[in-house]
């Protein structure tokens, strides 16, 4: 998979939301995938978070770089 520009941001589904396994009281977990923590701007992430919270979602989130995600790929993670 290719990477976008260094300042780009993607929103990824995670947890039960990413598995398409939500119940009535599930929170919505998302990952804000950024090109570089040094270059990303916080404002678009804050705006997206406020929008999701304002529409009533119980939001869980993380901000990760592409390299962070690749580093844990294939690791045996327990939840």
Image (spheres, rainbow, N blue to C red):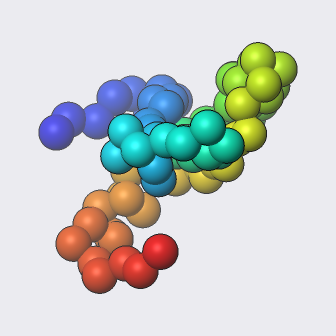
Of residue 2 and residue 45, the one placed in the foreground of this image is: 45
Name the residue at 33% across, 70% down. 71
Q: Is 64 drawn above or below residue 39 in the view shown?
A: below
Q: Residue furthest front?
A: 24
> Where on the picture, by quarter, is residue 77?
bottom left
Is 29 left, or right, of 68 in this rendering?
right
Name the residue at 83% across, 20% down. 54
Q: Is 55 drawn above or below residue 3 in the view shown?
A: above
> Where on the picture, by quarter, is residue 45?
top right
Is 5 left, or right, of 40 in this rendering?
left
Is 36 left, or right, of 62 in this rendering?
left
Residue 65 appears in the rendering: no
Instruction: Give residue 74's position: percent from left, percent from top.
Output: 21, 72
Task: Count the marks.
Answer: 0
Name the residue at 29% across, 61% down. 70
Q: Is 40 drawn above or below residue 61 in the view shown?
A: above
Of residue 37 and residue 25, the one placed in the foreground of this image is: 25
Instruction: Give residue 33's position: percent from left, percent from top.
Output: 48, 41
Instruction: Give residue 51's position: percent from left, percent from top.
Output: 75, 19
Instruction: Give residue 57's position: percent from left, percent from top.
Output: 72, 31
């Amino acid at each position: 998979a290719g990477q976008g520009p260094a300042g780009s941001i993607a929103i990824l589904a995670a947890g039960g939301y990413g598995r398409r396994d939500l119940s009535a009281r599930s929170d919505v977990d998302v990952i804000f995938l950024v090109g570089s923590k040094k270059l990303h701007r916080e404002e678009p992430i804050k705006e997206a978070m406020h929008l999701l919270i304002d529409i009533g979602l119980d939001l869980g989130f993380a901000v990760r770089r592409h390299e962070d995600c690749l580093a844990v790929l294939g690791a045996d993670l327990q939840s």
